[in-house]
Amino acid sequence: MNKKYYDLINELQKILDDPKVKSDKELAHILTSYKDKLENGGEYKLVCTKLTNAIATYVRHNHFKAPESVLKLYNHLANVESQYRGLFSFITWF
């Protein structure tokens, strides 16, 4: 694993330590599962893409409310997701 893996794992741990996240079992479960995937060697861009999708689904189901730390993470990962999706879109077209 390289630095980006460790940075994201550390960021997820900080978010999981947030009292607002700790009190929400569903959100904590989502974040913990993706942290575990990264720790077990999951492909970085794929995990980021799936995590942003999971956060977006969570936010929609919770009336567009989420802790600020989670929204910041989503915004940070959205760039990685768009690059990942863009690559597969390019491959599909050609």
Image (cartoon, helix red, strand yellow):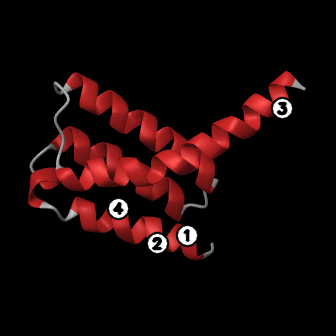
Identify the mark at residue 4; answer none if there is no mark.
1
The amino acid pointed to by label 2 is Asp
SS of the residue at dot 4?
Answer: helix
**Image coords of residue 27 (percent x, y):** 24, 42
**Image coords of residue 36 (percent x, y):** 45, 57
Label 2 or label 4, whichever comes before in sequence order: 2
Quarter of the image containing the N terminus? bottom right
The amino acid pointed to by label 3 is Ile
To which quarter of the image does residue 17 belong? bottom left
Label 1 or label 4, whichever comes before in sequence order: 1
Looking at the rendered image, the disc whose residue lies closer to the viewer, 2 or 3, is 3
Label 2 or label 3, whichever comes before in sequence order: 2
Q: Is residue 54 visible?
A: yes
SS of the residue at dot 3?
Answer: helix
The amino acid pointed to by label 1 is Lys
The amino acid pointed to by label 4 is Leu
Q: Is residue 63 left or right of residue 93?
A: left
Looking at the rendered image, the disc whose residue lies closer to the viewer, 4 or 3, is 3
**Image coords of residue 11 (percent x, y):** 36, 67
Q: Which residue bears the numbered disc 3?
A: 91
Q: Which residue bears the numbered disc 2?
A: 7
Residues at badges 1 and 4 in contact (C-beta under 8 Å)? no
Q: Which residue bears the numbered disc 4?
A: 12
Label 4 or label 3, whichever comes before in sequence order: 4
Q: Is residue 17 above or below residue 88?
A: below
Q: Is residue 56 left or right of residue 63?
A: right
Q: Is residue 47 visible?
A: no
For the residues marked 1 and 4, what is the alpha-carbon distance in whole angstroms? 12 Å
Residues at badges 2 and 1 in contact (C-beta under 8 Å)? yes
Q: Is residue 29 above or below residue 10?
A: above
Q: Residue furthest right?
A: 94
Residues at badges 2 and 3 in contact (C-beta under 8 Å)? no
